[in-house]
């Protein structure tokens, strides 16, 4: 599975750590930056290219990190086809995929420790959309809204 990752300065260290973790698990990782720590980064500059790559399916899923994960989630969800969420618990990391077909996970580099973040990301990547009729029906309503 090809995974895209991106972070601003608030998420840089966690993104670097997750890059190593994901490579170790055998995932192909596409790093959309930042490629060095720059305290003047603007998170949309890093997260939009990642979100576009998720929407176009250049990468199958995305991991976006900023200081809190909030800005990353806000901007990623502006890209049609992206279903991003800030994740701070293990249950939502997999249930967000199983029920809602979440395709981009957002994390707070100033909130979540590296080891816990690894567990969230692994749960996210190993989860699959259930395909249950009720979830498909709800997802379709989200897709219809996006078209308006
Ligand atoms: O979390 C974020 C957005 O949601 C940013 O990483 C955070 O706002 C950056 O703050 P600063 O420029 O003060 O380092």
Image (tube, rainbow, N blue to C red):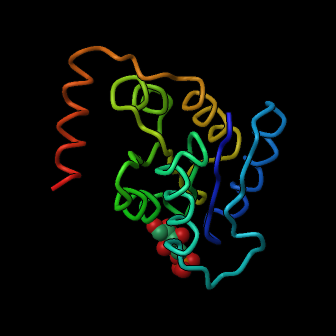
* In the image, residue 12 above or below residue 118: below
For the C terminus, give its image quadrant. bottom left
Asked whether 124 or 137 is in front, the reply is 137
Q: Which residue is pictured at 42% across the width and 23% down the height?
A: 129
In this figure, what is the number of numbered marks? 0
Task: Estimate the x, y position of residue 12 in percent, counting from the top left.
Answer: 69, 64
Where residue 85 appears, as percent x and y from the top left, is 41, 46
Decide: is 141 above or below 51: above
Left or right: where does residue 91 sit relative to residue 62?
A: left
Q: Give residue 95's quadrant in the image.
A: top left
- Residue 61 in percent (x, y) is at 56, 41
Could you tell whether 92 is left or right of 3 in the image? left
In-image side of 142 versus 4 (left or right) = left
Quadrant location, the N terminus: top right
Which residue is depicted at the point 53% across and 64% down?
A: 47
Residue at x-position 58% and y-position 39%: 60
Q: Nearer the viewer, residue 48 or 89?
A: 48
In this rendering, the answer to whether 31 lies above or below 8 is above
Q: Position of residue 93 (x, y in %)?
A: 48, 33
Q: In this view, which residue lies farthest toward the bottom?
A: 40
Does residue 98 appear left or right of residue 65 in this picture?
Answer: left
| Residue situated in front as seen by the camera: 58 or 89 | 58
Q: Nearer the viewer, residue 138 or 8?
A: 138
| Vertical placement of residue 97 versus 59, above or below | above
Residue at left offset 40%, top offset 49%: 82
């Amino acid at each position: 599975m090809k995974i895209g990752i991106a972070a601003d300065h608030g998420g840089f260290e966690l993104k670097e750590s997750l890059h190593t973790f994901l490579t170790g698990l055998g995932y192909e990782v596409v790093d959309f930056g930042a490629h060095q720590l720059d305290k003047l980064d603007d998170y949309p500059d890093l997260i939009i290219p990642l979100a576009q790559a998720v929407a176009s399916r250049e990468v199958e899923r995305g991991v976006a990190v900023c200081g809190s994960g909030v800005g990353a989630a806000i901007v990623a969800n502006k890209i049609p086809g992206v279903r991003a969420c800030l994740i701070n618990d293990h249950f939502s990391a997999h249930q967000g995929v199983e029920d809602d077909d979440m395709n981009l996970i957002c994390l707070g580099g100033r909130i979540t420790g590296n080891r816990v973040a690894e567990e969230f990301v692994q749960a996210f990547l190993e989860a699959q959309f259930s395909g249950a009729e009720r979830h498909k029906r709800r997802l379709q309503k989200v897709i219809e809204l996006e078209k308006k």
